[in-house]
Amino acid sequence: MSEWLHPALIYLAGAVVLPLVSHERARAGLLLAVPLLAALPLLLQTYGTYGQFTFLGETLTAFRLDRLSFVFALVFSLAAFLAALYAWHVKDRVQQVATLAYCGSAIGAALAGDLITLFVWWEGTAIASVFLIWARRTEGAYHTGMRYLIIQVGSGVILLAGVAIHYRETGSLAFTAFSLENVGAWLILLSFGIKCAFPLLHNWLQDAYPAATVTGTVVLSAFTTKLAVYALARGFAGTEFLVPIGATMTLFPIFYAVIENDLRRVLTYSLNNQLGFMVVGVGIGTELAINGAAAHAFSHILYKALLFMSVGAVLFRTGTAKGSELGGLYKTMPLTMVFCVIGAASISAFPLFSGFISKSMILSAVAKDGYLITWLILLFASAGVFHHSGIKIPYFAFFAHDSGKRPAEAPWNMLLAMGITAFLCIAIGVYPQALYSILPYDVTYEPYTTTHVITQFQLLWFSALAFGTLMLTGIYPPELRSKNLDTDWTYRRLAPAIVGFSIRFITTVWDELVRGTMIALKAAIAGLFALFGPGGSVSKPFPTGMMVLWMAIILGAVMALNLLDFG
């Protein structure tokens, strides 16, 4: 095939052509066709570097296809197709164009062989994806989109600064493994960390994704953060301090997810949690760990999309995704409920589901390398995932209290997209070798050992027991009609409060200064008026002799000064 047949360019061409198509079904068909066409270069091209060109004296590589980039580009293409099918009913050209540009940019970044090309596509994902939030066309979505855009573009600016410093220090623009020996590499890592939602850099995720449209959230869940995982695996595999970072990422979202009422925000917290498993794998950096991170990213894109699809279908039919306002929907949305349960089983790593065969690779790599504390944290985090995503999401959406809502089943295209995704989640779990065969390294791994299966069933059983006990005893946090803030409290509450206080303080000080100045000025004017005004002491008539005396004194003083020699 031609080396210039770049998958990302097919997406961009589709984004340019799509607005010109007037027929709604033709646009939807084009949205489906583009991912299929763009997948052909991935499937038919042999591994290697293509599309090399010279820019300002440097050789850039637009298309690098190897086993690591292939896994991510392939699952990105699959996610783009499923998202397009899920959004078949959408008539909004803004969302359609943004989806194509966003998916293409993510695939372009995954295939970039140099840092300049990576930066271009990196910023492309930021600019294109924000329109999926703004497409909701509410004031809240506008402000959320602005915050999201600032953070994402900021990540790109940090990346560009890191690239410039790295190039100055090393003379290389290759997108390969970095050594943290210069500031540039640290800035590149920070840029990747922002997009990967590292702790304290994560709040944009829970802020932005639930604010997007029903279909936009499904698209967003697949690309940005997994692109960051790919970038970390490419550039910082084996960076050991990523292990505690990843372990922290698996841990803290659990507590927020338990008390969160908005089910789409619950899913974003669990997304953050699952990213932590991948970051741990990248930090360990062994072949088994990298395979586990890549496999888990592949599985995660599918089962997380399935969960967002099912909750999105509920939001589409009922107008709400609040757990306190849902319940009893299994009566009229049984297929959506079944697909949601399959997604929940997958993210909970039930045996015979996709999450089990990928997460167990990471846990095995952690245990093999002797990270005992990290292994225990990941076990606890696995139980927490089952608690808030495996149980809470389907329970409160479909089974809890009967909300009285009787919506129609999801549209056929949503059901078909969910059905295909659910099938893939089961198929990968039943036949993991299909995924293992395309992973970056040839590692023989058997997930269905007695130890793995029994350990996982014990974990799931005790987690379910804990959930049931908490529900029956009334200890489980109720679904409150509220919105929880975590680190975004700093800029949504603290920063406005500080700015407001500063403005009030400066205004008060300024007002007092102006008031004091006016009082002093008025007093000075009054004093001058009293001295020089009519009837003032200076204005009184003086005798002629007194005036002559003063003139003589002044004249004498002037003459005395003239006699002095000041040299």
Image (cartoon, grey):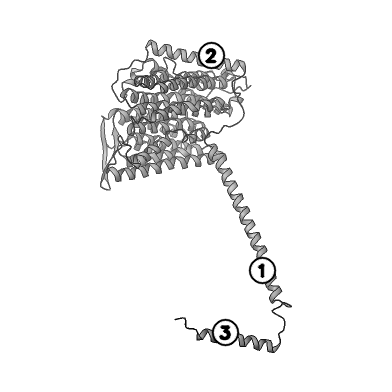
| Upstream in sequence: badge 1 or badge 2 | 2
Check disc 2 and give the amino acid type: Leu
Secondary structure beneath label 1: helix
Secondary structure beneath label 3: helix
Picture coordinates of residue 381 (x, y %)? 47, 22
Q: Residue at x 32, y 22 (%)?
A: 288
- Indicate the quadrant where residue 534 lies: bottom right
| Upstream in sequence: badge 3 or badge 1 | 1
Q: Which residue is mark 2?
A: 465
Check disc 3 and give the amino acid type: Ala
Dot label at residue 524: 1
524 up-or-down from 8: above or below: below
Left or right side of 28 for 551:
right
Mark 3, other Cα within 10 Å: few <14 / some 14–19 / many ≥20: few
| Upstream in sequence: badge 2 or badge 3 | 2
Picture coordinates of residue 386 (x, y %)? 49, 19
Mark 3 and mark 1 residues within 8 Å of each other at the beta carbon: no
Q: Nearer the viewer, mark 1 or mark 2?
A: 1
Mark 2 and mark 3 residues within 8 Å of each other at the beta carbon: no
Picture coordinates of residue 220 (x, y %)? 45, 33
Check disc 1 and give the amino acid type: Ala
